Image (cartoon, grey):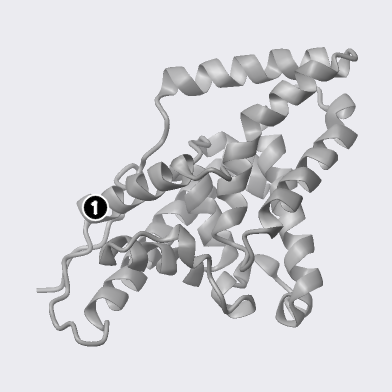
Amino acid sequence: MKPQVATDLDSIACVPKKDAILGKVAADRVLLERWRNGDRTAGEALYRNWVGALSRFFRNKVSDREEVPDLVSQTFVALTEVKDRFRGESSIRRLVFSLARKMLSAHLRKRYKRAREAKDFDTLCVAQVSAHGPSSLVARERGLRAFVDGLRQLSLGDQTLLELRYFEGLTGPELADVYDVPEGTIRGRIARAVGRLGRVVEEKLGHEPGRSDAPAVDEVALGSWARALRVQLGRDPDG
């Protein structure tokens, strides 16, 4: 019998606890306001608050890990340029990750011919434009390796959406702002992306050379790999 793939939107969530998120949101707003009023130390503190999340965002999407710090810096330069126009209608998280998506798009379009030719950038997948993945990122555990490879074989739109939702904890309204679509649309996209990821991971595990035993790809497995990846990225000295 074919294993069931996770479709519940919270089934692979490894989102930080709500109180922690709210506390960070409030702290970031205070720091941003102080920075806008000329306090450079507040800007430096805001950078320290975001360097880890931005590093996680870029690391599984570029082939050379040495490019990650530059992309993080470019994102923060962009934030510096727009900070005085931010009026608080949406969250700082939404603003930061919107800028990060733009930096990633510009980077891949500049570096890879296929990305430059794409009419709809979000339909590309990292594995198409960048043959070499961040191998040092991946644990030896077979399932986690398939999970990370599976993320990279999704479209950039799906990969980014799942990572922002389940690793960084963006809410439905925040994601709707990032992608500039209604919240109901974004929730439907999340459900479909979760299903596609499950099927890709299932295929990888079932067709790995020399292995005929295909473990079930269910909500528990996807959730375990998502949590393990976030922990691994969080412990990385670069992030």
Q: Quadrant of the C terminus?
A: top right
Tell me which corner region of the image, top left, top right, bottom left or bottom right, holds residue 13. Answer: top left
Q: Using the rendered view, name the quadrant where residue 32 is placed.
A: top right
Q: Is residue 19 above or below residue 137?
A: above
Outermost residue toward the bottom in this view: 209
Q: How many marks?
A: 1
Using a 10 Å C-alpha cutoff, classify the residue at mark 1 as few (fewer than 14 neighbours), some (14 to 19) or many (20 or more). Answer: many
- Extreme left residue here? 1
Tell me if residue 4 comes above or below residue 111 in the rendering: above
Residue at image location 20% in from the left, 63% down from the top = 4
Res 90 visible: no
The residue at the point 58 percent across, 61 percent down is: 157
60 or 41: nearer the viewer: 41
In percent of width and height, residue 74 lies at 80, 47
Q: Amino acid at mark 1?
A: Glu
Q: Which residue is mark 1?
A: 219
Location of residue 165 in the rendering, given as x and y in whole percent from the top left corner? 48, 43
Q: Is 36 left or right of 8, judged from the image as shown? A: right
Element type where label 1 sits in the image:
helix
Q: Does residue 109 appear anywhere in the picture?
A: yes
Q: Quadrant of the N terminus?
A: bottom left
Horizontal side of residue 135 vs 14, given as left or right:
right
Q: Residue at x 42, y 44 (%)?
A: 230
Q: Position of residue 140 (x, y in %)?
A: 31, 63
Residue 75, image x, y percentages:
76, 44
